[in-house]
Amino acid sequence: MSALDDKKKKGLVFNIQKYSVHDGPGIRSIVFLKGCPLSCRWCSNPESQRLEPELAFNPGRCLTFSKCTRCLQACLRGAIIREADDSLRIDRSLCDGCPKNCAEACPAQGLIVYGEERTVDDVLRVVEQDAAFYTRSKGGMTLSGGEPLLQAEFALALLREARRRRIRTAVETCGMVPWKTMEAAAEHLNYVLYDIKHMDRSAHEAHTGRPNEVILENFRRLAELHPDKPVLVRTPVIPGFNDSEDAVSAIAEFIRPYPNVRYEMLPYHRLGTQKYHFLDRVPPMDDVTLDKAVMPRLIEAAVRVLGDRVDFPK
């Protein structure tokens, strides 16, 4: 694939987050791609799940009290409905996330369209703005989502072109993609963040919507075929799902044979709950919280298996 062809490739991006220090080495820009094959009940980025633009509505920012009607006038589908009490709602059967007319018309940013078609060149122009930080910190660009490799053609073009521009690359993946996609991505990656949520097939399927055979097999192949590539396996610790020493120890034993692999557990948080409401969805986890006493116990269990290959949550 030529550099010119790669630059023109288009994909659906819902955010570019700068100055991250949590998703790979150094200071990084995180490019969030839409779409995910899993439907994890604890997902903190519900806006990432569907491979299409989505309109979010934050009623707390709405100016209907001042009789503002700009979004109603701008909506091409008549999907924004004004109720008798002057409040607004979105008729999701009519809204198709069309080009941001209503969101651009909203003076208070109460409407946001998650998902915009962007070219590789456009995305990397934003990423390159912080090139000086990458050089000093040995950071770079991380593709995240959703599952970034679900948009395989676009993701691979981003990785190839980034490497041509001497930008270090990483991916945050759930592993639920065809091996040929994972294999192609690995050739252009400096670092991999790989989610392994549970070793039990039934438990994994019950809480994410999909079994885990592909995820585990892709990990084995990646670790065995690329023994020099740094990989960080991450497990989100979820109450009632994998917050037990047995669950964590099983994952640690699975990755133990691969010396290039480190391990990190991420405690469950509820930071994405509000976004479900903005998208007119019910948060699957409701008001569940993680007991503060759980993480030290699980970290100790992982250290018993992996020793100093366990990273502590930042």
Image (tube, helix red, strand yellow):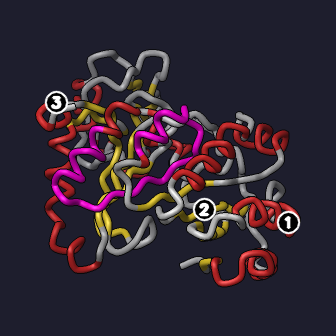
Q: Does the residue at mark 2 contact the one at mark 3 (Cβ under 8 Å)? A: no
- Residue 234 in the magenta stretch? The answer is no
Q: Is residue 16 visible?
A: yes
Q: Position of residue 196 (x, y in %)?
A: 67, 54
- Quadrant of the rendered image containing residue 207: top right
**Residue 194 location, x and y as percent?**
56, 55
Picture disc at residue 233: 2
Residue designated by label 1 = 244
Q: Which residues are magenta?
A: 157-185
Q: Nearer the viewer, residue 232 or 37?
A: 232
Q: Residue at x 66, y 37 (%)?
A: 214
**Mark drawn on residue 303:** none
Cα distance between the residues tagged 2 and 3: 33 Å
Label 2: few (<14), some (14–19) or many (≥20) C-alpha neighbours in 10 Å: many
Contact flag, marks 1 and 2 (Cβ < 8 Å): no
Residue 53: name its quadrant: top left
> Image height check: is 134 above or below 202?
below
* Residue appearing at x 81%, y 77% in the figure: 301
The 10 Å Cα crowd at callout 3, few under 14, some 14 to 19, many 20 or more, is few
Horizontal side of residue 11 vs 166, given as left or right: right
State the quadrant of the N terminus. top left
Nearest the viewer among 280 and 134 is: 134
Q: What residue did someone put label 3 on?
A: 5
Q: Amino acid at mark 3?
A: Asp
In this rendering, the label closer to the viewer, 1 or 2: 2
Mark 1 or mark 2: name the one nearer the start of the chain.
Answer: 2
- Image position of 70 with respect to 172: above or below: above
At mark 2, the secondary structure is: strand
Give the distance between the C-alpha atoms of the residues marked 1 and 2, in whole angstroms. 17 Å
